[in-house]
């Protein structure tokens, strides 16, 4: 695919009066370099991202977003859109352009009768599920509570309820989106259905979604937690897990983690820093039934730690937060796996044994269930058939260690090349991977249709800091 769009942006050359007029049009704030909150506003989850936008529009509502889109288009500015700022690639922040910051738009309306929730784009998954919990409801999306609702949903939406209720985007009923022409549109199955199709998998490239209407589900107490074994037992644990997961009910979302135990209260002192394999679980159904379902996992081998217990779903939503704290340098590589094959198991375990940072994790997500029951062409997200996704989530504290950690991650990923699918979950993708091949791996058979929607709704490629889709020349 080649792009018909401009790929460079002229230097920002706006006089003070123009910027002042833009500021006065906003109900929210407009920040420039030197302003008191500027440095805090440009920080994101990944400490490797250190970009300096010319302007940051902290939007207070949809009208501010419309004003910001119109301003950027009129003046030819590079645009980035910030929701939770959690994406590893740092798409939320740009150099020299305009950041449309949605993080203060936290409105939420819950209808417990219809089991729907209308969430503004500044909410994260922890906030959304915290407010749903008193109604015995939960939204499917997000393993980590500080992950923003917009980015995760628009690119897919893995989370603790996904095998029972599908991806976050599978639970969308409608969105309100500001497109590149500055128009606020509602996209749903009956209004702009083509746009609604594209938003569910490629939303970031089509506009700024300012609110999401979700179907939410009855979920109060869940059985959740983590079972941990020494890394030396990882091959046999993964072989067992492979067979166990193949027959697991949809109520159980689970996976595997290769990680180093932190000095946490639940970790015996003699195990601090030990390399281990963990099986995280969330069973969303009757607790008594869940106890029976997860018993084989808890009884296999001799776990060194077993944290599985009943808990409110909003608590389960935060249970993995400590493994992905903000403020560290992050570099990720990821792909879908057709199977948890013996060579893949051996490669992952042997490579992880030489991990350079105790903050790095390898994640294996078990997919299937409700995800696979959605027709591949129903949404722009095409990856319904894969059994697993794997993620090398490298993290480290000191910038001096960046080269070593990045090189280790790249070599690990290269070793996984024979075992992975030619398909990538865009939410785990670092921007250096952009290009025609990677876009094809993110969007699969939908790349051409998405390029046509892109040309319709964003003909000048205003929203380009994403997994961009373009038409063939």
Image: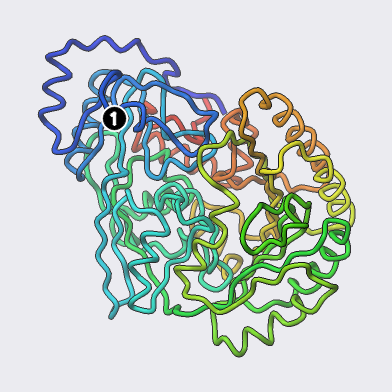
Q: Is residue 4 shown left or right of residue 30? A: right
Q: Residue furthest bottom?
A: 288
Q: Residue at x 15, y 27 (%)?
A: 23
Quadrant of the rendered image containing residue 8? top left
Q: Is residue 465 shown left or right of residue 225? A: left
Q: Is residue 394 shown left or right of residue 223? A: right
Quadrant location, the N terminus: top right
Labels in figure, total:
1
Instruction: Work out whether residue 94 or residue 454 is closer to the camera in this orientation and state it.
Output: 94
Residue 313, position in %: x, y?
A: 47, 72
Q: Residue at x 74, y 27 (%)?
A: 404
Q: Residue furthest front?
A: 269
Q: How is the image coloured?
A: rainbow
Q: Which residue is mark 1?
A: 37
- Is residue 335 something that shows in the picture? no
Instruction: Work out whether residue 250 or residue 437 is closer to the camera in this orientation and state it.
Output: 250
- Give SS at disc 1: loop
> Looking at the picture, does residue 34 appear above or below residue 70?
above
Quadrant of the rendered image containing residue 250? bottom right
Residue 74, position in %: x, y?
A: 23, 21
Label 1 environment density (alpha carbons within 10 Å; few <14, some 14–19, many ≥20) = few
Quadrant of the rendered image containing residue 438? top right
Residue 217, position in %: x, y?
A: 42, 75
- Is residue 22 something that shows in the picture? yes
Q: Residue at x 46, y 45 (%)?
A: 202
Residue 166, position in %: x, y?
A: 52, 66
Q: Residue at x 64, y 35 (%)?
A: 396
Instruction: Work out whether residue 372 or residue 274 is closer to the camera in this orientation and state it.
Output: 274
Instruction: Work out whether residue 93 or residue 355 is closer to the camera in this orientation and state it.
Output: 355
> Looking at the picture, does residue 1 appear above or below residue 154?
above
């Amino acid at each position: 695919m080649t792009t018909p769009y401009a790929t460079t942006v002229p230097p920002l050359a706006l006089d003070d009066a123009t910027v002042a007029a833009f500021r006065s049009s906003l109900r929210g704030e407009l920040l420039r370099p030197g302003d008191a909150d500027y440095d805090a506003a440009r920080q994101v989850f990944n400490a490797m991202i250190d970009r300096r936008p010319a302007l940051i529009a902290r939007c207070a509502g949809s009208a501010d977003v419309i004003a910001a889109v119109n301003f950027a288009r009129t003046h030819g500015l590079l645009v980035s859109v910030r929701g939770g700022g959690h994406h590893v690639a740092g798409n939320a922040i740009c150099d020299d352009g305009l950041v449309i910051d949605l993080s203060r738009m936290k409105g939420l309306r819950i209808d417990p009768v219809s089991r729907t929730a209308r969430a503004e784009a500044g909410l994260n998954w922890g906030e959304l599920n915290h407010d749903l919990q008193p109604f015995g409801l939960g939204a499917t999306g997000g393993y980590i509570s500080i992950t923003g609702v917009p980015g995760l949903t628009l690119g897919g939406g893995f989370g603790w309820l996904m095998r029972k209720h599908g991806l976050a985007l599978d639970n969308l009923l409608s969105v309100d989106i500001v497109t590149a022409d500055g128009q606020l549109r509602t996209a749903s199955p009956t209004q702009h259905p083509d746009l609604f199709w594209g938003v569910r998998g490629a939303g970031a490239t089509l506009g700024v979604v300012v609110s999401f209407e979700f179907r939410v589900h009855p979920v109060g107490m869940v059985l959740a937690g983590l079972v941990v074994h020494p890394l030396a037992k990882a091959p046999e644990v993964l072989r067992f897990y492979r067979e166990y997961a193949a027959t697991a009910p949809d109520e159980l979302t689970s996976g595997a983690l290769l990680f180093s135990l932190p000095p946490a209260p639940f970790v015996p002192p003699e195990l601090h820093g030990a390399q281990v394999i963990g099986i995280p679980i969330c069973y969303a159904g009757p607790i008594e039934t869940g106890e029976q379902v997860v018993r084989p996992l808890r009884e296999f081998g001799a776990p060194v730690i077993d944290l599985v217990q009943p808990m409110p779903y909003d608590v389960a939503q935060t249970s993995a937060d400590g493994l992905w704290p903000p403020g560290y340098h992050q570099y990720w590589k990821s792909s879908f796996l057709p199977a948890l094959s013996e060579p893949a198991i051996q490669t992952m375990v042997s490579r992880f044994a030489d991990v350079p940072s105790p903050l790095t994790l390898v994640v294996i997500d078990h997919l299937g269930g409700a995800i696979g029951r959605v027709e591949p062409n129903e949404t722009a997200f095409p990856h319904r058939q894969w059994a697993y996704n794997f993620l090398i989530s490298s993290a480290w504290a000191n910038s001096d260690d960046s080269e070593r950690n990045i090189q280790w991650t790249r070599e690990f990923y290269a070793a996984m090349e024979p075992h992975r699918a030619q398909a990538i979950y865009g939410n785990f993708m670092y921007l250096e991977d952009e290009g025609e091949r990677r876009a094809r791996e993110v969007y699969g058979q939908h790349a051409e249709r998405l390029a046509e929607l892109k040309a319709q709704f964003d003909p000048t490629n205003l929203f380009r800091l994403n997994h961009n889709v373009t038409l063939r020349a």
